Amino acid sequence: MKPDGPKTKPSRLIELVEKGEDVVITRSGKKVTAIASPAARTPRTFLDTNILVYSDDARDPVKRQMALNLIKAHLRLRTGVVSLQVLQEYFVSATGKLKLNAALAKQRVEVFAKFHIAEPAVSDILAAIDMHLLHGFSYWDALVLRMAKQTGCRILLTEDMQHGQEIDGVRIVNPFV
């Protein structure tokens, strides 16, 4: 994107880059330099429940650190997406499987809610059922895939589906392999 005018303030350029836009700076109509936004290079990414759960799982310190790094990076770059389903599943898993205190798990949900939140509509539920029928995914995995697609994600981070598979333009990536 070109700046607003010939004398765009540096603070405006920074604001554009922080919003995820690349900025091209010109002089007399010729390109002088460009500022590439890190978010523009990082595709919009959907984080499945297991990524969030691993961020609190002390039983596997390697996966825990990897999950924390992914969460921090996508929060910082504003490229992360989760759904209401993922937030609910996280709370149930964290308080059940991990025995996390419910108040602490609620605080974590509040942090994860800083991601873009996908809210399914009836059409998404029906599309997930179709995906379940067509591809054999569990209904819940199909709904996660549907919400990833609906929110413009090109990557779905999960360990629950086949690594490297691409469905409807969404590539499944297991970050732990």
Image (cartoon, rainbow, N blue to C red):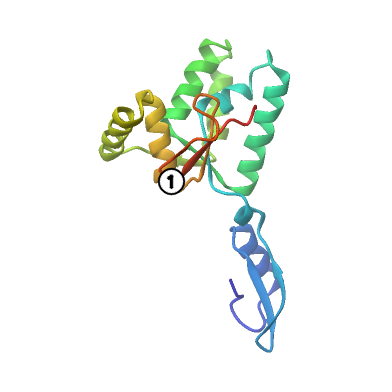
Q: Position of residue 24 (x, y in %)?
A: 65, 73
Image quarter of residue 174: top right
Front residue of this view, candidates 117 and 25: 25
Residue depicted at 51% across the width and 11% down the height: 96
Q: Position of residue 117 (x, y in %)?
A: 45, 40
Give the residue at mark 1.
151
Residue depicted at 54% across the width and 47% down the height: 44
Residue depicted at 67% across the width and 62% down the height: 36
Residue 35 visible to the viewer: yes
Residue that protrudes farthest toward the bottom in the picture: 28
Q: Quadrant of the C terminus?
A: top right
Please give left or right for residue 164 compared with residue 22 in the image.
Answer: left
Q: Quadrant of the N terminus?
A: bottom right
Q: Secondary structure at mark 1?
A: loop
Q: Taking 45 as reference, is 101 above or below it? A: above
**Within 10 angstroms of label 1, few (less than 14), some, or many (20 or more) residues?**
some
Residue 107 visible to the viewer: no
Image quarter of residue 50: top right
Q: Which amino acid type corresponds to the residue marked 1 in the rendered image? A: Thr
Residue depicted at 45% across the width and 48% down the height: 152
Q: Position of residue 113 (x, y in %)?
A: 51, 36
